[in-house]
Image (cartoon, coloured by chain):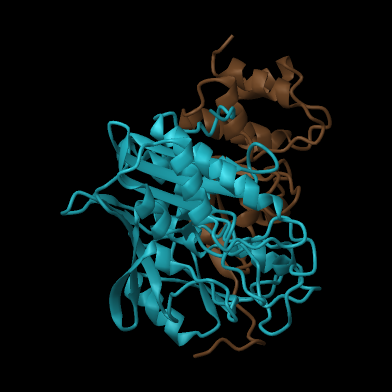
Chain colours: A brown, B cyan
């Protein structure tokens, strides 16, 4: 019963609800959710930064919770609802976080922005951040190498309805 | 990452069966550490057994007034659980000091105990490492060892255990519930992780085919006088250079019961029963807490680059015990150290 080194694993059929659409995929087990989104579903809004869970650029919402898609195997999320930055806007209107990021110029190069916005959406849903220190702490999993942090915090505060 | 087979366990017994049938297999729950290690080819399991759907997600009261936490409760759910916040705030605080919000949403309680060291040489397959490749040597002992252990080290390994959660669990006297091919057993958390000795590749006392099913907290929660202080190179989302979990029960200013556990300094959470016993009946003063630090750090040994950790730990122990005594626990969001 030992696994032979040369045994080629089967592709595994899975279903994901991605941004409200049911998608069926046949994936080898080592496909990360990030690679499934980017390479198989061509949803390239979600970014591959470090690919090791250290930068947060790959953040998506799975069943409403923010996670690092680079450290998640797609086959383990069979049946899950995934929201990527492409699915954040509703009915053609920008999500308040997207508008707030524009209003506060909360980016420079923009590479971390999809992860920042998905992470901030998770943060708002969790409801544990009440002031700017708590926003900073609970957004620490999202790095911005351009250093737009003060504006990111201001944008999130705007989306939280704080002045 | 190497190719691997994938199975989904239908229940705990099935997970044990699969683990026993496939010697190269590993369990996966949150995957936050295992997948990372697989990407680096440090871990190369022939098969992953997905246990993430097993019904081990409850937090239940035990008959003696403690809590039993299912092994698959996500770290974030545990930290924000009202029972934990009210009765075991030390545990909540330690969990929130670790990783990021995303990782805490993914990582399971059992997986947190199973995470491996972040020693850079362990991660770098181009260098010798006794933990990764037994007998190959330790690159850290003569290398860059600023982050490494000062207590309980061996000539084979000076790696540290990276967990914050385990430090609080050690202080609280938690138990680990384990199921395996020969039935169920319970182990004190402080006995779960091992010192490196000459077998640093074996992190824990879990036997082949065994799976963590739950963590049990004893009734005593130290909810009034506690603090978790984590000292690191940046204020968030970094591993500890030194961390201290302190818990006291006071009778006026006299200490009735004391618990102190250290993180970031050894291959496992570090406690000294001698240090804790010596505090009982004493007044909560800097002088007595300095003595606690001396006893906890007895035998501490510096490597070339981490000598600062001994004094850092000494000061952090006194500071954290004082925070606990004053009922002013360290905030994990507002970073100023009281």
- For the N terminus of chain B, the quadrant is bottom right
Residue depicted at x 49% and y 90%: A1
- Choose between B288 and B271: the one closer to the eye: B288
Q: Is residue B287 above or below residue B168?
A: above
**Quadrant of the image occupied by residue A45:** top right
Q: Nearer the viewer, residue B320 or A135?
A: B320
* Residue B203, placed above or below residue B76: below
Left or right: where does residue B232 sit relative to residue B334? right
- Identity of the residue drawn at 63% across and 38% down: B236
In terms of depth relative to the viewer, which is nearer, A63 or A14?
A: A63
Q: How many discs appear?
A: 0
State the residue at coordinates (70%, 45%).
A43
Residue B75 placement (x, y as % from top left)? 46, 48
Q: Quadrant of residue B316?
A: top right
A3 to the left or right of A144: left
Whether residue A122 is situated above or below residue B181 in the rendered picture: above
The percent coordinates of residue B196 (x first, y second) are 57, 73
Q: Relative to residue B58, is residue B34 drawn left or right? A: right
Q: Position of residue B99 (x, y in %)?
A: 58, 46
Q: Can residue A64 be seen in this snapshot?
A: no
């Amino acid at each position: 019963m030992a696994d032979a080194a040369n045994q080629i694993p089967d592709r595994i059929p899975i279903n994901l609800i991605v941004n409200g659409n049911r998608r069926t995929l046949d994936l080898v087990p080592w496909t990360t959710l990030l690679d499934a989104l980017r390479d198989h579903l061509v949803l390239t809004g979600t970014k591959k930064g470090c690919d090791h869970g250290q930068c947060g650029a790959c953040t998506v919402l799975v069943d409403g919770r923010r996670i690092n898609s680079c450290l998640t195997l797609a086959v383990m999320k069979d049946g899950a609802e995934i929201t990527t930055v492409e699915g954040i806007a509703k009915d053609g209107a920008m999500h308040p976080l997207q508008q707030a990021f524009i209003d506060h110029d909360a980016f420079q190069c923009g590479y971390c922005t999809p992860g920042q916005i998905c992470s901030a959406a998770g943060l708002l849903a969790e409801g544990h951040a009440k002031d700017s220190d708590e926003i900073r702490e609970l957004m620490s999993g999202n790095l911005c190498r351009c250093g737009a942090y003060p504006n990111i915090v201001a944008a999130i505060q705007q989306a939280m309805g704080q002045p | 990452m190497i190719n691997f087979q994938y199975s989904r366990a239908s229940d705990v017994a099935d997970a044990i069966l699969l683990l026993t049938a496939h010697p190269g297999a590993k369990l996966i729950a949150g995957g936050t550490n295992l997948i990372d290690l697989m990407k680096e080819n440090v871990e190369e399991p022939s098969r992953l057994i997905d246990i993430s759907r097993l019904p081990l997600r409850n937090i239940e009261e035990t008959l003696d007034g403690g809590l039993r936490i299912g092994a698959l409760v996500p770290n974030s759910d545990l930290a924000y659980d009202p029972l934990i916040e009210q009765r075991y705030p030390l545990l909540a605080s330690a969990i929130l000091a670790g990783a990021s919000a995303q990782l805490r949403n993914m990582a399971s309680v059992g997986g947190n105990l199973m995470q491996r060291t972040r020693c850079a040489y362990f991660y770098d397959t181009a260098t010798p490492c006794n933990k990764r490749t037994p007998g190959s040597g330790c690159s850290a002992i003569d290398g860059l060892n600023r982050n490494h252990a000062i207590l309980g080290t061996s000539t084979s390994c000076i790696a540290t255990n990276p967990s914050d959660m385990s430090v609080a669990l050690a202080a609280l006297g938690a138990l680990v519930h384990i199921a395996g091919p020969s039935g169920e057993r319970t182990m004190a958390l402080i006995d779960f992780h091992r010192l490196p000795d000459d077998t640093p590749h074996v992190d824990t006392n879990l036997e082949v085919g065994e799976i963590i099913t739950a963590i049990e907290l004893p009734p005593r929660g130290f909810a009034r006088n506690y603090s978790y202080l984590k000292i690191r190179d940046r204020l968030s989302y970094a591993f500890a250079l030194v961390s201290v979990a302190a818990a006291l029960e006071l009778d006026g200013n006299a200490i009735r019961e004391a618990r102190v556990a250290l993180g970031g300094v050894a291959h496992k959470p570090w406690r000294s029963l001698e240090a804790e016993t010596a505090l009982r009946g004493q007044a909560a003063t800097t002088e007595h807490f300095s003595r606690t630090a001396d006893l906890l750090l007895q035998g501490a040994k510096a490597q070339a680059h981490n000598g600062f950790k001994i004094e850092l730990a000494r000061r952090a122990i006194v500071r954290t015990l004082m925070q606990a005594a004053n009922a002013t626990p360290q905030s994990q969001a507002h970073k100023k150290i009281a």
